[in-house]
Image (cartoon, rainbow, N blue to C red):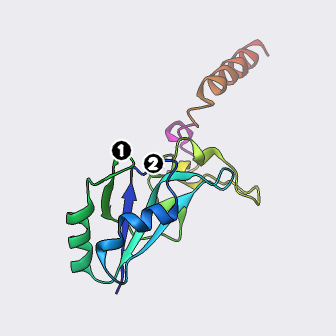
Amino acid sequence: MSVRLYVGNLPEDLSRQDLEAAFADAGEGVTAKLITDRKTGKCRGFGFVTVKTDELADQFIEKYNGVSIKDNAIKIEKALPRTKDKADEPEAAASNAGGSSAKRSKGGNNNNKARRSTTPAGDSDSVQPDPRWAQELEKLKQMLATQATNS
């Protein structure tokens, strides 16, 4: 069973070859994957390393956690398992990439399931609006309230 490790705090100008070279003395069966921005091709600041066993993962973390790559002290920990339904992820994890949660997918279908409340639809006071639009929403509510009292 292979174990996937998260490698964070990677420099922007890092290439996959640089990452593999940093872990070259880790031994056989260690694969590295660098996560890059689609538009610029630059490193997004993190990547993943896969090792064969749990024991090797612990040894890898102990050996490389805090090691400096291009003046950045990297952080290594066991990666969380992938989830099929994005609604189960915490909102903080979705917005961890500097506001990338607001970007639309290629299909244009951005449901923002993580932002939806799980309360019944009749309890509208408990539903929290998107914080980027909260002020505008409050203005609209006030305008509607004044219209309702004038009618």
In the rendered structure, the answer to whether residue 69 lies left or right of residue 42 reads left
Q: Amino acid at mark 1?
A: Asp
* Residue 63 placement (x, y as % from top left): 22, 65
Kindly report the distance in space between the C-alpha atoms of the residues bearing marks 1 and 2: 8 Å
For the C terminus, the image quarter is top right
Magenta segment includes 126: yes
Q: Residue furthest bottom?
A: 1
Helix, strand or loop at mark 2: loop
Indicate the quadrant where residue 145 lies.
top right
Residue 11 - label: 2
Front residue of 125/60: it is 60
Front residue of 44/73: it is 73
Residue range (magenta): 122-129
Between disc 1 and disc 2, the foreground one is 1
* Residue 146 placement (x, y as % from top left): 71, 14
For the N terminus, the image quarter is bottom left
Q: Tell me the residue at 33%/53% (across/down).
A: 74
Q: Tell me the residue at 26%/58% (across/down).
A: 65
* Chain-order first, disc 1 or disc 2: 2
Q: Tell me the residue at 42%/51% (across/down).
A: 10
Helix, strand or loop at mark 1: loop
Q: Tell me the residue at 40%/70% (across/down).
A: 49
Magenta segment includes 16: no
Residue 20 - label: none
Neighbor class of circle 2 (other Cα within 10 Å; few <14, some 14-19, many 20+) is some
Q: Is residue 75 above or below residue 134?
A: below
In the rendered structure, the answer to whether residue 2 lies left or right of residue 16 reads left
Image marks 1 and 2: residues in contact by CB distance under 8 Å: yes
